[in-house]
Image (cartoon, rainbow, N blue to C red):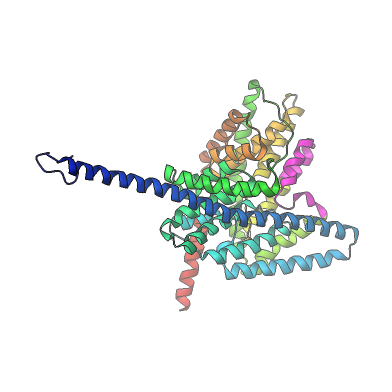
Amino acid sequence: RLPAGMPADGNLKSGDWCMERDSISRTLRRFSNMRYLLVLEGIGVGAAAGLVTVLFRAVLSQGETVLHAALAFGTAHPYFIPLWFVILLGAAGLVTYLLKWEPLISGSGIPQVEGEMQGRIRTVWWRVLLAKFLGGLLTIGAGLALGREGPSIQLGAMAGKGVSRLSGRTGEERLLITCGASAGLAAAFNAPLAGVLFSLEEVHKKISAGLLLPCMAASITADFISRSLFGLGPVFHLPEISMLPLKHYWLVAVLGVLLGLLGAAYNRCTALAQDLYGKIPSRYLRIALPFLLAGALGFVYPQVLGGGHSIVEGLSLQPAAGTLALLLAARFFFSIACFGSGAPGGIFLPLLVLGAVSGGLTGTLAGLAGISVPAENFVILGMAGFFAAVVRAPITGILLIYEMTGNVSHLLSFALVSLVAYGTAELLHARPIYDQLLDRILKNRAAEEQKSLRKA
């Protein structure tokens, strides 16, 4: 094909060739400058999202300290227990008000971000940012089995949207939202690579060089801010774990099948819990129930409260099989009861905790059966496999566990357990959790719009 401006006979004067070459050079320079500009914008979004997420994480840490102090005081002074339940009911009322003011803060927030990326949901970024921050502090701080990572991703995404709106770069809004989601996960878990991959694999549903560079810039910037405050170490401080001998890899496949079954059950039980909560007409009552449950468990079985970070690290002490079985059952149903209510909070960390306990139980049972294996291996394998079964993002899960634990020598076993768990969940036709949640959100919004039209 002849270059633009070339005569049909192909004879082009030297001056015309120079003009054509200069035009191509200017186009390439503009493209290169645009990529540099996107990287700079990614750094800006990473700074904004990182600051918001780090503040959220720091306040949650203080809230956990206050929670433990309140429960200890109530245990020593029983007269405080009724007052504590009154405080919880008041917190439930505030969360209910925030949900009424901004309904899109319910749950983890990741399905809402995915819906926005697909053009099916429109959010007011500052309302979501403010309401999610306060709602997440109230629910997680009260001891509900919810995590900080989902809210952190939504907070980061809304920070990215805010940067696009305030800077007038609305044409790049979807890109900056993706950068913000990357930064949010990176700051929440000190996991910059997993933050990038998750936002591209799960949120944006697309990977390209134009997306990768600004997302990496945002994620690294947010991770730098997070590590400046919380230190350079991984999120989970686990002892050094020895390599699993190849002759025992059949146990990894067995664990993958078990995690696939448990993951499919978790997704379906979550949907069932949401259906049951949906039959309760009062939104306040729906939110108050898990708050009251957290209050009761706080004085009876406090180990199951909160996101579960301490549970994972406590598994290195190798509890008895009965203790692990009780912990797994309690966390499974408590997590579903909390998340199914629609209270603001994530399921990322609760999922990892369930996977870790499942893996620890499998390793302990293998030891009781006379199979000499390092049970600690199954803790981290359980996290990777259960994440793959529930979220259906195995590569992100492998990277996430690697960055959160600092274990790089177990990638083969990570890959095997994730593949088997993923395949088992697929064979059971269990939908990925975030797709399932997004469909429910859109269905509920459509029902509410039809109800409003009928009233009008």
As for residue 316 lying within the magenta part, the answer is yes
Is residue 87 found left or right of 285 in the rendered image? right
In this view, the residue in front, 382 or 285, is 382
Is residue 29 something one can see in this rendering? yes
Q: Residue at x 77, y 60 (%)?
A: 295
Residue at screen point 23% across, 44% down: 20
Where the C terminus falls, by quadrant?
bottom left
Give the left or right position of residue 22, taking residue 61 as reference.
left
Nearer the observer, 255 or 24: 24
Residue at 35% over, 49% down: 30
Residue 310 is drawn in which quadrant?
Answer: top right
Query: Which segment is the magenta one?
Result: 300-328
Check the image and report above or below for 83 versus 327. Answer: below
Please tell me how many numbered marks the rendered image carries.
0
Q: Residue furthest right?
A: 76
Q: Is residue 269 magenta?
A: no
Main SS, magenta region, reads: helix
Residue 376 in percent (x, y) is at 72, 32
Q: Position of residue 341 (x, y in %)?
A: 63, 60
